[in-house]
């Protein structure tokens, strides 16, 4: 699903990623662990081009999204991302946060279809061969209603339906992060990238966020998670990557990597954190 | 002060019986017209410039725009508004052969002038919004433009509202120079009353009071608006 080929990223003279090649298949749950400064967050952010790779390619569903000529926005719609700092839109209520992107993109697509149809009709008047129109089977109101219904369904799922019309500033960290996760889910992504989703949370709120991620994993969603929660990584991941100094030093199943690490750096790191 | 009541009577005579008040209303209308339209124009120009200033400059077009905006801001912050008004009215427009009412010239000049100031205010506002907001928008597949206009700019506007209020108040007071190009504002109106009654004490005093009341009304309006925009910060 995602094939990363010799990905490199440098800031000026600082090489953060020094050539990463990895392939992530559909339904996999990949956990990335490693000491801080090892480039794991940068790697994750390169996967949806939040950081533009310096060189290398990222093939997502057959398209090289590292290519600057590709319209990255279309591909990002299929890759959800959850941040360490939640990043809920502060000027929008909870439900508006979830609805914003689906409604905007739905209406944008509708309008561009209408726009194209207008020119096709104009062309059809003057030419003999009639070009078919784009099919339009929705309206603005329907897009909005559907998005609202979907948002409410997602909020019900995480038990925060009563918070639909409040602003994010009134919520706890755990609630914010769960809403950030369902905001990503509202786009029906094929993969979700988690950038240390629990690192900014109070300890007692970590559980509720991890539970939601576990649910997603059980439903078969493809997940890529940068995390410091080793127990959690061991529990849900199908594959664990250990990164240090911009390289993947070891990748294996969680049982293997946690109980029988091969690389000396992995051993050292795990002995410190476990 | 013995003849103060006489002065007041004289003022009232010109103000009420000789239709001085229509001039005052006209002046008030012009003042507000120039200040409000100028501010609207300024906010539009300022927002555009601020966005040009904050977009990433990988490509050549943003760089060119950046230089142009620097020039524009330097030009309009570097000269007094009176000079801009006079140059626009007596130099630029005749040279270009454009026929324009002096009122429109005022709106244009004040708009361009406040655009230069608002651009810096707005830039500060945009930079005060956490970068994560933009990232979250982009991660959902929104374009830079949409994420900027739907998420970042509304939050920036909320942050800079007190400063924008300042700008509006400054604009209202600065409009008192429009008589240089023949627009009748409050000063012209009260000057007319003074000239006709040979007495300037009361008219100018009333003029000052009108300005103060105007500014206080605006300050209250801004406060109300700020409170409404702040509702997303409130914790309850």
Image: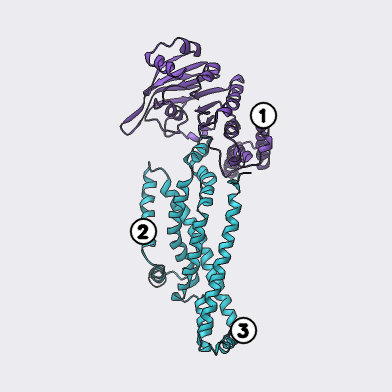
Residue at image x 39%, y 58%?
B73
User: Element type at marker 3?
Assistant: helix
The quarter of the picture where residue A216 lies is top right
Q: Do marks 2 and 3 both belong to one polypeptide chain? A: yes
Residue at image x 45%, y 9%?
A260
Instruction: Name above or below for residue A127 compared with residue A66.
Output: below
Instruction: Name the spot of residue A199 as percent of width and height, x first.
Output: 50, 29
The quarter of the picture where residue B32 lies is bottom right
* Neighbour tally class for label 1: few under 14, some 14-19, many 20 plus, Cα within 10 Å: few
> Can you tell which mark lies on residue A157?
1
Chain at tag 2: B
**Depth order, front residue of B213/A27:** B213
* Neighbour tally class for label 2: few under 14, some 14-19, many 20 plus, Cα within 10 Å: few
Earlier along the polypeptide chain: callout 2 or callout 3?
3
Chain B shade in the render: cyan
Q: Do marks 1 and 3 both belong to one polypeptide chain? A: no
Chain at tag 3: B
Residue B101 visible to the viewer: no
- Chain shown in purple: A
Residue at image x 52%, y 19%?
A233
Instruction: Name the spot of residue B40 as percent of width and height, x first.
Output: 52, 60
**Depth order, front residue of A26/B101:** A26
> Can you tell which mark lies on residue B16?
3
Instruction: Name the spot of residue B23 as percent of width and height, x first.
Output: 56, 79
Judging by the rendered image, the residue that carries numbered circle 2 is B74
Q: Do marks 1 and 2 both belong to one polypeptide chain? A: no
Instruction: Name above or below for residue A265 compared with residue B230.
Output: above
Spatial separation of the CA atoms under disc 1 and disc 3 = 70 Å
Spatial separation of the CA atoms under disc 1 and disc 2 = 55 Å
């Amino acid at each position: 699903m995602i094939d990363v080929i010799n990905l490199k990223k440098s800031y000026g003279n600082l090489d953060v990623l020094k050539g990463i090649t990895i392939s992530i298949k559909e339904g996999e749950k990949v956990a990335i662990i490693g000491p801080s400064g090892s480039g794991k967050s940068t790697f994750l952010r390169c996967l949806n081009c939040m950081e533009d790779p310096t060189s290398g390619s990222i093939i997502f569903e057959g398209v090289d999204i590292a290519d600057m000529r590709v319209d990255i926005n279309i591909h990002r719609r299929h890759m959800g991302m959850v941040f360490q700092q939640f990043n809920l839109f502060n000027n929008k209520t909870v439900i508006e946060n979830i609805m914003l992107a689906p409604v905007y993109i739905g209406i944008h697509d509708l309008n561009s279809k209408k726009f194209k149809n207008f020119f096709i009709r104009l062309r059809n008047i003057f030419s003999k061969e009639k070009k078919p129109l784009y099919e339009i089977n929705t309206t603005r109101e329907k897009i909005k209603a559907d998005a609202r219904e979907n948002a409410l369904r997602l909020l019900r799922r995480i038990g925060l339906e009563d918070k639909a019309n409040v602003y994010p500033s009134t919520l706890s960290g755990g609630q914010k992060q769960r809403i950030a996760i369902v905001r990503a889910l509202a786009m029906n992504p094929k993969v979700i990238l988690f950038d240390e989703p629990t690192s900014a949370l109070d300890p007692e709120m970590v559980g509720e966020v991890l539970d939601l991620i576990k649910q997603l994993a059980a439903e078969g969603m493809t997940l890529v998670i940068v995390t410091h929660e080793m127990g959690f990584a061991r529990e849900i991941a199908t594959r664990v990557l250990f990164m240090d100094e911009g390289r993947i030093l070891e990748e294996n199943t969680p049982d293997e990597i946690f109980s029988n690490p091969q690389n000396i750096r992995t051993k050292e790191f795990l002995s410190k954190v476990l | 002060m013995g003849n103060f009541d006489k002065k007041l009577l004289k003022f009232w005579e010109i103000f009420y019986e000789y239709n001085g008040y229509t001039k005052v209303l006209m002046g008030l209308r012009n003042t507000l017209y120039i200040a409000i339209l100028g501010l609207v124009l300024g906010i539009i120009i300022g927002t555009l410039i601020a966005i040009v200033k904050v977009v990433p400059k990988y490509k050549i077009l943003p760089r060119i725009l950046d230089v142009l905006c620097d020039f524009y801001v330097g030009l309009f912050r570097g000269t007094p508004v009176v000079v801009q008004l006079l140059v626009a009215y007596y130099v630029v427009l005749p040279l270009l052969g454009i026929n324009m009412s002096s009122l429109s010239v005022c709106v244009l000049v004040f708009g361009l002038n406040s655009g230069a100031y608002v651009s810096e205010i707005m830039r500060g506002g945009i930079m005060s919004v956490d970068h994560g907001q933009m990232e979250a928008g982009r991660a959902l597949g929104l374009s830079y433009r949409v994420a900027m206009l739907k998420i970042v700019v509304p939050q920036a506007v909320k942050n800079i509202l007190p400063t924008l209020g300042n700008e509006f108040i400054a604009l209202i007071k600065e409009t008192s120079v429009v008589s240089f190009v023949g627009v009748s504002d409050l000063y012209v109106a009260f000057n007319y009353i003074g000239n006709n009654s040979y007495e300037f004490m009361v008219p100018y005093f009333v003029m000052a009071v009108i300005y103060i009341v105007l500014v206080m009304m605006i300050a209250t309006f801004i406060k109300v608006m700020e409170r409404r925009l702040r509702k997303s910060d409130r914790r309850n």
